[in-house]
Amino acid sequence: MTKLALILSLCIIFTTFISSSNAISSCNGPCKSLNDCDGQLICIRGKCNDDPDVGTSICGGGGGSSPSPPSTDSTPGMLTLNDFSEGGDGGGPSECDEKYHDNNERVVALTTRWYDNGSRCGKMIRIWADKNGKSVTAKVVDECDIKDGCKNNVVDGSIAVWRALGLNTDEGRVPITWSMA
């Protein structure tokens, strides 16, 4: 083996060792922090997955303008905070009933695909906080429309929902699982 070939081989081995020791995971790869995942992926429950903030569907397929997965008996998502009261950050009255809702009411807006053209209006859903296992029921009163900037995979909940789940509203986004109640 020539000196050049030996040096080249050592460089390749060194580069492989360095890159594998700081490996960035792709879809469903292990992770502990946001920095462990490749590209537009985030760490969700210890695995790299699509980033709902970016709206990617690299891992789970999907497509179109609404890559939120179809809802099932237990659908993973992200809980965000919304003020449904008049003058609150929810904007106008809720789409389902054309009313504003007090912050003490357990109400939610569902991301466009889950809202399903209003078919869930007035229906109750059950939400489980992944962080602590607590659950609560809440009424669907609005759409969290992706055309207006809402992220995919979102259940936009009132302060009452966050409190019932024992969550800190300062976090802004927390992983949850939800289903029809």
Image (tube, rainbow, N blue to C red):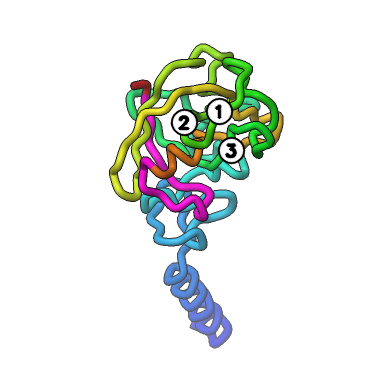
Amino acid marked by disc 1:
His
> What crowding class fits label 1: few (fewer than 14 Cα within 10 Å), some (14-19), or many (20 or more)?
many
What number is the disc on residue 105?
A: 2
> What crowding class fits label 3: few (fewer than 14 Cα within 10 Å), some (14-19), or many (20 or more)?
many
Residue drawn at (40%, 21%) of the image: 124
Mark with earlier residue (3, 1) = 3
Amino acid marked by disc 2:
Glu
> Measured from the top left, where is residue 24 in percent x and y?
49, 61
Is 167 magenta? The answer is yes
The residue that disc 3 covers is 83
> In the figure, residue 128 lies in which quadrant?
top left
Query: Mark 1 to mark 2: distance in Å?
Result: 7 Å
Q: Secondary structure at mark 2?
A: loop
Residue drawn at (37%, 53%) of the image: 46
Magenta-drawn segment: 164-179
Of residues 156 and 17, the one nearer the viewer is: 156
Of residues 121 and 60, the one nearer the viewer is: 121
**Can residue 43 be seen at all in this image of the molecule?**
yes
